[in-house]
Amino acid sequence: MNAMGMGTLTGGIRVRLPHRIGLAGLTALALLAAGCSSGSSGSSGGTNWSTVTTASAGGGMAKLIAAAKKEGTLNVIALPPTWANYGNIIKAFTAKYGIKVNSANPDGTSQQEVNAIKQENGTAAAPDVVDVGQAVALVNTGLFAPYEVSTWTSIPATQKQSTGLWYEDYGGYMAVGYSSKFGTITSLNQLLGSKFKNAVALNGNPTSANAALNGVMMANLAEGGTAGSIAKGVAFFHKLKAAGNFSPVSATGASIKAGTTPVVFNWDYLNLPSYVGVPNWKVFVPSNAVLGGYYAQAINKNAPHPAAARLWEEFLYSQAAGGGQNLWLQGGARPVEEAAMTSGKTIDAAAAAKLPPVSGTPVFLTQAQNTAAANYLAANWAKAVS
Amino acid sequence: MPFFAYVGVFLLLPAGIVIVNALKNSTGGWQLSAVTELGNPLVRSYFIGSLKLCVISCVTGAVLGAILAYAVAAGNPDGVVRRLYLAVSGVLAQSGGVTLAFAFQALLGPAGLLLHASWYYEFPWGIALIYAYFQIPLMVLVFMPAIDGLKVQWREASENLGASAWQYWRHVGGPLLAPAFLGSTLLLFANALSAFATIAAWESQISYIVPQQISTSLSSEVGLSNINYADVLALGMMIMVIVIMTGYALLQRRASRWLR
């Protein structure tokens, strides 16, 4: 390049040699510091909690609480405070046991949680526990430590892994939330009408986000499709786009409040009027398309704080009035121990009554169906809605 | 030597990692088949999308930015207008990302304050408009020194010899500015190619361009996450830039041939 070209590109700025050396030195130092974070201590006292599979095997709840308090910290990841009441759950845990909770990357996805486990392995900042979508839990069991909480028998057999590598925690049904300015919606086909121009949105890209994939699958079921093939769902969104009703803006709290996305396909616990913060927000679950989705808990095999991780799980699955299951229910999510708690009368009845009414048999996607849907979307989604 | 170390760590090492990972499969063995994915029509559509957006964005930015730079440079060199424009350009050239996308959405989106532009969510027009917001100031910043290099005496001399304005630009000003113009356009192209945060905030339900697809490959929670595929896409972007740079180098040689 000639002199004029070079000078033009950098605008004539030249960094002096000593400054350059200093800059290089500083960056090298920063890299070294980041790379050499201190290792983690796995065991506390005599018990190595990272291999303990139940609280009683480790010497009982009291020993677990003492060991967790000694560790003093818990690393969690991808837990937005307004998602299923996680903000209050974290506060309640810290208030009860005095253990500090480091919440990293609150807007992360399930895949990012697993990536963090792999990439931060051996450091003190690695996540101790994860809350991931079913698909991600199923393929990453090699990263998890088996553990069975005290209320293990209250979790339905189909909703946990038999040796305790993962166990479902809360879930909901895919619903359509909408502003009441549209009247009352009773069927998805109404969304093709002209008053919904640019109004209907998903919560993310279906090839990337679990909630969005389930949104398309719910439309699929409502249009008469089966869980084995998501083609009718994609066709529905294609029709929506052709009618000019599909909004490419991802539905987030901000976009809903701004009125940019007045109709949203999202889990019912994320479509609660109180969560969304918009007055007169309504929710409906199509009677012929009840698609359920639960998330799953797992403990990192190499958790830097294994006792605290196990205590967290005990807290989340506790059926007490202030325990995790009821706190999730207050966030509008259905706790996995709902059936056991209803018959045992430990459930928060007022919160349970606020859940949107659901009729019809719920469908849960199997891993094979999930994979087939994801592959179909990868090949056809962009074409259908762009 | 320290500069080489700096470049090595931040440029050569990541590039090396991308190339190596693109040739590996998920269990760590070597495979070439992922690279042949680049011929897949779906993948090609992402690259074409990226190319469309970058070309539109760099051409509008270059042309409008050059005109604006010329207008500002023609004024008083120590004047308020010039200093103001350069300061503002310095700030706007770095703007982008979520705040910019949201600002445009608030202005032109479905609930827009100014108007609801139906083309705002059409690819590539809406996003090209947003990109122009930082491409034009960037062009002004990098092209201004070149225009300053055009000596007034040359214009005077050509007018003395009877040249019209068109002839001046065709034979004197144009060839002088061409290398710098091309270099700046290339900078704008690279800037648009790698921009991700802005388009991710503009819309995130469809992947139009390669960076969006790389993001999906790295963080998909429905099982489509594939780090090797992401590295293959990144390799594809590197190849694209290498091709463009080769074309630029050839064009540069031609544009500055009268200097040799």
Image: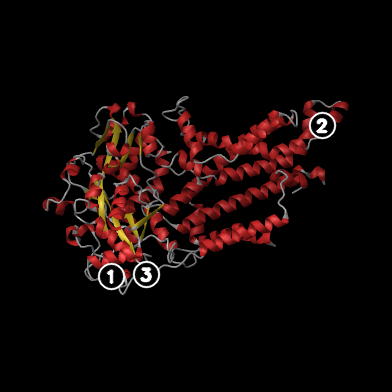
Element type at mark 3: loop
Between residues B201 and B128, which one lies in front from this camera angle? B201
Q: Residue furthest bottom?
A: A46
**Disc 2 marks which residue?**
B152
Query: Do the numbered discs 2 and 1 sit on residues whose CB atoms are within 8 Å?
Result: no
Query: Do the numbered discs 2 and 3 sit on residues whose CB atoms are within 8 Å?
Result: no
Residue A42, disc = 3
Q: Using a 10 Å C-alpha cutoff, classify the residue at mark 2 as few (fewer than 14 neighbours), some (14 to 19) or many (20 or more).
A: few
Do the residues at pointers 2 and 1 share their chain?
no
| Observer able to see residue A146 | no
Between residues B102 and A208, which one lies in front from this camera angle? B102
The vertical placement of A142 against B236, above or below, is below
Q: Residue at x 51, y 65 (%)?
A: A36
- Residue B105 position in % (x across, y down): 46, 33
**Disc 1 marks which residue?**
A52
Do the residues at pointers 1 and 3 share their chain?
yes
Q: Nearer the viewer, mark 1 or mark 3?
A: 3
Element type at mark 1: loop
| Colour pattern | secondary structure
Q: Residue furthest right?
A: B161
Q: Nearer the viewer, mark 2 or mark 1?
A: 1
Residue type, numbered disc 2: Val
Q: Based on the displayed image, in which of its 4 quarters is residue A20 positioned?
A: bottom right
Chain letter for the residue marked with disc 2 in the picture: B
The vertical placement of B50 against A315, above or below, is above
* Quadrant of the frame with the C terminus of chain A: top left
| Label 1 – label 3 distance at C-alpha | 12 Å
Chain letter for the residue marked with disc 1 in the picture: A
Element type at mark 2: helix
